[in-house]
Image (tube, helix red, strand yellow):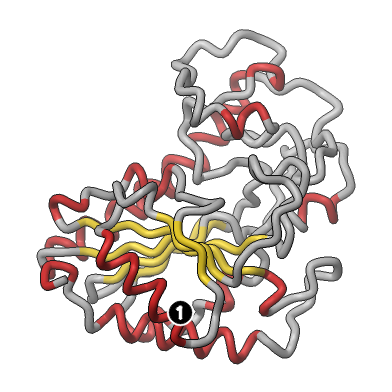
Amino acid sequence: MLRFLPGTTPLVLDSPHSGTRYPTDFGFSCDRMSLRRAEDTHVEKLYDFVPDLGVAWIEAFFPRSYLDANRNITEIDATLLGEAWPDPVETDPVMMSKVRLGKGLIWRMTDDGVPIYARQLSVAEVRGRIDCCWRPYHTAVGAAIDAAHARHGYSIHLNCHSMPAVASSHATDFPGESHADFVIGNRDETTASGPLSLQICEHLAGLGYSVSYNHPYKGVELVRRHSDPARQRHSVQVEINRKLYMNEQTLEITDGFAALQNSLRSLVATLLQTDPRAL
C-alpha cells in the first residue's frame, strides 16, 4: 500500500495523499470522481526526479479518503461507527476541528460536503485500515528520517501536498478562500526552524510564485510526529496550488506541469546544499 525508496542525503520527501488504488473493502456510496478530486493528484509525478538525487521518497498508494495518514489515530469520527470506539479519542479542540468537518482519520464527507458512506463502519475495519495503511506509512517516514539524521547529523523532511485553487466548503476553516501558489507550513515554527522555512519561502518567491506562510495550512500529523527542530530534525509541509499544473475538474495535467517541476528541482537542489545548523 506504499512505496518506500531509501535515500543517501539528508533530505526526505513524502506524499501521503496522492494514492489512487481504491481498496475493494472501501464500501463508499458517493460518486467516485468526488473522491478522486480529494486526492493530491499527480504530486508523485511532480517529484518523480528526487530518488535519482539520493532523496528518500515515501508515497501512499491508498487514497486519503479511505484513510488519511496525515491524521492521528486518535482523530476518530464517532458518528461513522456502528459501535463504541474502544481506543483513545482526541480531545484537543484544534485537532478535532477537521473531524467536525468530516475529515478525521477516516473521512465522513468529501471536500464539498457530500457524505461518503451510506452505512456505518465497524471497529474492526477501522483498525484494519490503521494496521494496513497508517502504521506502515508512519514507520517508513520515521525510518527514512532516522537514517538521514544518523548519516548527516540533521534531516530535512518535506511533506508534499497539493491544494485546490479555492477552498471548498468542507476543506478548511476558511471556505471560499483563494490560495497562494504555495503554502509553507511548520506549525508556527514548532516542526522546523524559522530560518530554514523562510529560506524555502524566499526561494519560491524568487522564482515568481506567491507564497503564504502557515496559512491556511500549518502542517498536520506527519510533520508534528516526525520533527524535532531542537535536535535538527526539521519537517515542513509544502502545499502546491493545483491550478499551476492540472485541470481540477478533469484531473488532466496541463502545460504548466513542466515549469513547476523545474521549480521544484531548483528548490530540492538548494535544500541539498543547505545545512540548517548554519542558518
The residue under the point 55% across, 61% down is 161
**Residue type marked 1:** Leu
**Quadrant placement of the C terminus:** bottom left
The residue under the point 74% across, 59% down is 166
The residue under the point 12% across, 69% down is 152
Residue 248 left/right relative to 53: right
Residue 22 left/right relative to 114: left
The foreground one among 88 and 177 is 177
**Label 1 packing within 10 angstroms: few (<14), some (14-19), many (20+):** some
Residue 276 left/right relative to 251: left
x then y, percent, for residue 273 = 23, 83
Report helix, strand or loop for mark 1: helix
Say if 106 sits above or below 183 in the image: above
> For residue 51, what is the image quadrant?
bottom left
Residue 265 left/right relative to 228: right
x then y, percent, for residue 128 = 56, 31
Q: How many marks?
A: 1
Is residue 160 shown to the viewer in this render? no
x then y, percent, for residue 95 = 49, 31
Q: Residue under circle 1?
A: 204
The foreground one among 125 and 267 is 267
The foreground one among 205 and 73 is 205
The residue under the point 49% across, 18% down is 89
x then y, percent, for residue 212 = 51, 63
Say if 135 sits above or below 275 in the image: above
> For residue 115, what is the image quadrant?
top right
Is residue 266 shown to the viewer in this render? yes
Say if 21 sits above or below 221 in the image: below
